[in-house]
Amino acid sequence: MKTVLFFRHGKSDWDAEYGADHERPLARRGRKAAAKMGRFLAQAGPLPDAVVTSSAVRARETLERAMQAGGWADRPVRVTRALYEAGPEELLGEVREEDDDVRTLLLVGHEPAWSAAVREAVGGGRLRFPTAALARVDFPVAHWADVVSGRGELVWFVIPKILP
């Protein structure tokens, strides 16, 4: 079995000074939520064997805060612009390229791609990803290359406001 953890970046700071949208940082609320979700993942598991994050500042900051707060900062991280404006098929394409030694992969990125990708992975339904939400989708495959749309199972979906 292969597991994908979809993690949306935390709340961004629209009032901060930044150039392009890609450079927008996290707001205070986003930093707190990212840390909360990092601790949640450390307790709930599974922890990722590898991480792929959008190169956007808010996504990288979300990941850094989550990893530090959860105590799993030793995971290998790949930063890519490909997740910044990716659609569901591009996301699943990134997943299919992962090394088979990885059992659990964490993707950090953006809406509307995350909602669409999870719906695509599990074969439909309604899902809206608020900031800093985290979803676990399991695929009954031995190889990442065999991940196909509609075959995933949504195991859990957690938003930061329900956690203590």
Image (cartoon, rainbow, N blue to C red):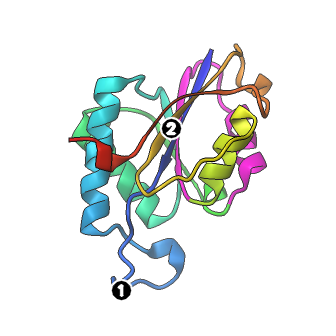
Residue 100 percent coordinates (x, y) = 65, 20
Three-letter residue code for mark 2: Ala
Alpha carbons under labels 2 and 1: distance apart: 31 Å
Q: Mark 1 points at which residue?
A: 17
Q: In the picture provided, is 19 more to the left or to the right than 98?
A: left
Q: 126 and 144: which one is in front?
A: 126
Evaluate whether residue 58 shows in this view: yes
Residue 135, numbered label? 2
Task: Say which residue appears at 50% left-offset and 64% top-offset.
Answer: 56
Task: Say which residue appears at 30% left-offset and 34% top-offset.
Answer: 40
Q: In the picture provided, is 52 more to the left or to the right than 43?
A: right
Task: Say which residue appears at 45% left-offset and 35% top-offset.
Answer: 76
The stretch in magenta equals 86-110
Q: Is residue 28 above or below residue 36?
A: below
Three-letter residue code for mark 1: Glu
Label 2: state its secondary structure. Answer: strand
